[in-house]
Amino acid sequence: MADAKVIPFGEEPRSRRAAKRARGRGPSSPSASPSSPSSSSGSGSGSGSGAAATSGPHSLSSVPDQPDGVEDSPHVDGQTPGPAQPDAAAPGTGGPAMAEDPAGDPAAGATEDGAESGGGDWDRRLAEGFAFLRRRVTGDYEVDEFGYDKELTDQVLMSLIRPLYANYFRVEVKGIENIPSDGGALVVSNHSGTLPLDGLMMQVAVHDNHPAGRHLRLLAADLVFMLPVVNELARKAGHTLACAEDAERLLQRGEIVGVMPEGFKGLGKPFGERYKLQRFGRGGFVSTALRHGVPIVPCSIVGAEEIYPMIGNSKTLARLLGFPYFPITPTFPWLGPLGALPLPTKWTIQFGEPIPTDGYPPEAAEDPMLMFNLTDQVREQIQHTLYKLLVQRRSVFF
């Protein structure tokens, strides 16, 4: 009988030939007989190059054509050959390693965590906002005997003033450490600018820069509390009447009290007299500080004089309207409401060395000579600091 003739199927991969040899040498697999009839060369009907030989118990099977890009692999337990799998095995399992889940990518996880964190932050803010509105509607908030609403001031009023303070006037604060961390103190400042914006800027400067986040309680003129809307807002922001009784009650509670002794004389002075301090009255603020033994902190503000350059004063209109003066500036009243926009000057607020008053005897508050000397000392220190800051200033606007 003629030897069987095996038709080659092209170059086989080395891994497939090794697998076939291993099957041929197996204890249960007899070696192929050389006399086994071969399959036809693919010319018969219903048979092709991939058809298996039908004669003999150990006939050779043709290997089906593999698609491009797919590695040949031997048949295992009758399974259909599929795409090549990674050869790496998972540690300790003996099987193929599992492919990494794209969802477990650390960067993707970090992004999702960041998104959740951002969403949580916005949820927290919304919850706080709704809680704030609920308290305002139901009246569940505290107001002190002067009408000061701390929650409204911190969360609303300060937030409205802060852009003007930080971005428009670009206020620079110096000497904030001279304001005590606890206990009462009296801050005495110059006053200017036609409109009392300097008091508001000083209030934000103390609250935002002091390590203890203290609040400045300003003493305001009677006119402030006679104007509609302004009256309520001033009370809510912690302002009170510029009288000795209110100042003493605040100092007894350990508050920081702000006073501007120049009053309307400093606020409405002509532009040609800028940075020249007016008279400080009769020294009532010194008497108040002496009675309670609190330090006096001089404060100098540069930049407020130029926001509304006052070149004239219409006294007739001032009398008709009940104002102490009616300012005329290069833009007001010529440009209407647009003329009320302040010029974007660069501000500097400096708190000077405190002047102690706790070393004086109780009867010192009734000594007119001592009050005059201390008043003059405070005024001279503020004026000297103003000149010093003006020399150091590069420009009105920068």
Image: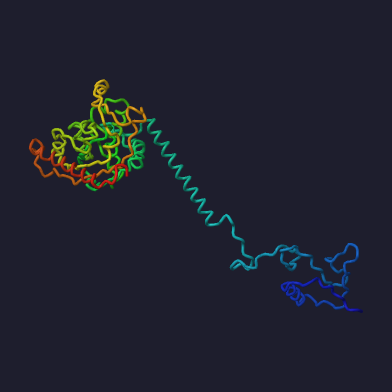
Residue 172 to residue 269: above or below: below
What residue is shown at x 51% (from left), y 52% (from top)?
Answer: 111
Q: Which image quarter holds the N terminus?
A: bottom right
What residue is shown at x 22% (from left), y 42% (from top)?
Answer: 300
What residue is shown at x 59% (from left), y 57% (from top)?
Answer: 101
Q: Residue furthest top?
A: 320
What residue is shown at x 25% (from left), y 41% (from top)?
Answer: 302
Residue 47 to residue 186: above or below: below
Q: Which image quarter holds the C terminus?
A: top left
- Percent coordinates x, y for residue 112 in the rendering: 52, 50
Q: Residue furthest right?
A: 1
Instruction: Compare residues 100 and 67 and report the one nearer the observer.
Output: 67
Instruction: Compare residues 392 and 48 and report the one nearer the observer.
Output: 392
- Percent coordinates x, y for residue 134 in the rendering: 40, 33
- Would you identify the image quadrant in which residue 42 lies? bottom right
- Percent coordinates x, y for residue 89 in the rendering: 62, 67
- Give the left or right position of residue 237, taking residue 188 as reference: right
- Give the left or right position of residue 137, taking residue 286 as reference: right
Residue 273 to residue 21: above or below: above
- Would you identify the image quadrant in which residue 161 lies? top left
- Percent coordinates x, y for residue 156 in the rendering: 36, 36
- Would you identify the image quadrant in which residue 288 lies? top left
